[in-house]
Image (cartoon, rainbow, N blue to C red):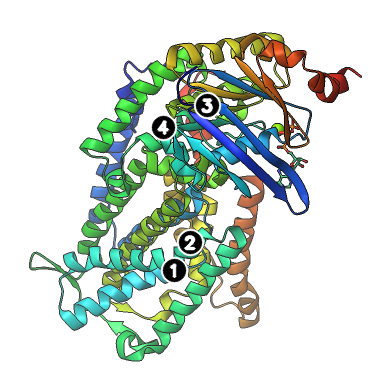
Amino acid sequence: MATQPILSVEGISLSFGGLKVLSEVSFQVNPGEIFAIIGPNGAGKTSILNCIGGFYRPSAGRIFFGGEDITRTSPDRRAARGLARTFQNIALFRGMTVLDNIKLGAHAHLRTGLLSALMYWGPAHREEMALRERVEHEVIDFLEIEPIRKQAVGSLAYGLQKRVELARALAMEPKVLLMDEPVAGMNAEETEDMARFVLDIKEERDVTIVLIEHDMNVIMDISDRVMVVNFGQKIAEGTPDEVQHHPEVIKAYLGEKKG
Amino acid sequence: MRMGDFKQTYAADEAVFRSGTVRFWLVVLLLALAAFPFMVGPYLLYMANLTGVAIIAAVGLNILTGAAGQISLGHAAFVGIGAYTSAILTTKLGLPFLVCLPLSGLSAAFFGIIVGAPSMRMKGLYLCIATLAAQVIFDFIFVHWTSVTGGIRGINVPSAELFGYKLDTEFKMYFVTIPIMIAAITAARNLFRTRVGRAFIAIRDRDISAELMGINLFQYKLYAFAASSFYAGVAGCLQVYLLRIVTPEHFPLHESIRYLAMIIVGGLGSVLGSIFGAIFMTMVPEALQSGLAMFQGMDDKLMSYLFPLQTVVFGLLIVAFLVFEPHGLAEMWRRVKNYFRLWPFEH
Ligand SMILES: Nc1ncnc2c1ncn2[C@@H]1O[C@H](COP(=O)(O)OP(=O)(O)OP(=O)(O)O)[C@@H](O)[C@H]1O
Ligand SMILES: [Mg+2]
């Protein structure tokens, strides 16, 4: 691909106290692809997403998003520029309904300030109505969650909560979607639904996806390229097929799992 | 899903008062509020006015503490700032009521933003202590900056004037207090229909993912402090014109705690809950007082035991709510409503 990468991570390192969590991890994600990150438990996968999202500050290295250096940008500004995220341990706002959680995703695209919010005249009212329409058509319909939109998220089954989290991320209208173990803990049917949604998002919405997953079937089925990390280091990168047969990977990851 | 009132459009679904029934009862309530002053004496009107002021203050605190999750032990101080602002502006500069009202809100909001600034670095208990410090400092200023605040003797204030019309009775003040209260409630309801209100709740529920959602935590915490103390300042202004005097005794720490108790008893994060809580916490002490008055004339020894009982009952109520009904009166009300929606058909 001749195009410029949409996301480029250059030699990031991260440690907590004496514990080195990431050492000089570099990779590039091309526009429109599904890029998977795999590796054993504690390898540092979530930490990589946290660095990209701005929740962790790497001690070295730089991160470029759409060609711009975002290494020092605050998490909320990164989100506003088009980085969305779903979490390994669901991080929905439990005091709110499904609908409000999804609307929250659109926060950075809305303009209403404190004063007009209190008045709720003209622009604020129109903005909320337009938001509701958009969220209904582009997110709720798409993810097939119409029946639960008024329910409190806390009362939903685990698989549905994961779907609502994806809905909230989609409402952010992201350019890049970071997904941390989207099918973990799901049954076969839920997993299949989720995999289909991820593929649809990539194909219909022009969204680039960075995905962490332990489920190898899902990885093999949907990802374009895979990066393998172990002990905070990148040990391989390539197509799912290449990676699966990479000797280092079999030794470090697949081998360990089977053995 | 309720089949009774299926929403045709998203706009109708987004409306605050969704069904005809709700709108009907709202009109009934407004009419009752309008008729009330013509049917009762000055004491009950005085109580109604004080309750109206408490509701405004409680709605404000619930924005900050209930919705945005930033516990404040300094709310009474902000009411005090509003009260002193009004008192000083009227007596020293002769500014009219209608000018003092927004200025009181704004000056309280200004100090609210200053007190809220540490919230960038502090959370939970630490922030709570910072607001407690603010309470103590402002209390100190009210008492000791005698040349401006009149010290412990306070400032006497002439009655408010509106378009040349003197608001010198409880009856007349009622028609100012209650509309302002309704406006304050409406504004708070509006707030929670927009991105700003949602951002507050997001910060309370999970501040880290709120930030990853594009919410600037510091900006929104300051918004919450500003809005909350603006409400407090407006309440303070009204209180001054009701009592015609302001002294430091009106804004001690336990008044701040009383505001917290209002929103806990009423329901954290619920506008309706702030209303219930403010009514409850204004009425119950009165009821206890008149209950005790029945024992008046009995021997003094007994009275000396009964009097502190008031505080005990008060404390027990708060604890009981925290333990048995953490979502407060608002949640009890919701259950009663649900029961009657299906009534008389059993489910
Ligand atoms: N905030 C933190 N403080 C201290 N140590 C941390 C922190 N976050 C992560 N770590 C450590 O960094 C290492 C990598 O964690 P990370 O969550 O990135 O792994 P992971 O690859 O996502 O694992 P899993 O597959 O179990 O989700 C672990 O040893 C973890 O204990
Ligand atoms: Mg992880």
Q: Position of residue A196 (x, y in %)?
A: 57, 10
Task: Tell me the crowding category of disc 1: few under 14, some 14 to 19, or many 20 or more residues within 10 angstroms, Cα based.
Answer: many
The circle drawn on residue A177 is: 3
Task: Tell me the crowding category of disc 2: few under 14, some 14 to 19, or many 20 or more residues within 10 angstroms, Cα based.
Answer: many
Residue at figure coordinates x 48%, y 69% from the top left: B255
Q: Do the residues labelled 2 and 1 touch (CB within 8 Å)?
A: yes
Identity, as a three-letter code, of the amino acid under mark 1: Ala
Which residue is denoted by mark 1 in the rendering? B76
Which is nearer the N-term, disc 3 or disc 4? 4
Measure how far apart labels 3 and 4 are at the Cα level.
14 Å
Q: Is residue A88 above or below residue B332?
A: above
Q: Is A73 or B172 nearer to us in this picture?
A: A73
Task: Tell me the crowding category of disc 3: few under 14, some 14 to 19, or many 20 or more residues within 10 angstroms, Cα based.
Answer: many
Residue at figure coordinates x 43%, y 77% from the top left: B138
Identity, as a three-letter code, of the amino acid under mark 2: Tyr
Measure how far apart labels 4 and 1 are at the Cα level.
36 Å
Q: Is A195 or A52 nearer to us in this picture?
A: A52
Identity, as a three-letter code, of the amino acid under mark 4: Ala
Please identify, in this view, whether the residue under mark 2 or under mark 3 is nearer the observer.
3
The circle drawn on residue A106 is: 4
- Chain for mark 3? A
Q: Do the residues labelled 3 and 4 touch (CB within 8 Å)?
A: no
Measure how far apart labels 2 and 3 are at the Cα level.
43 Å
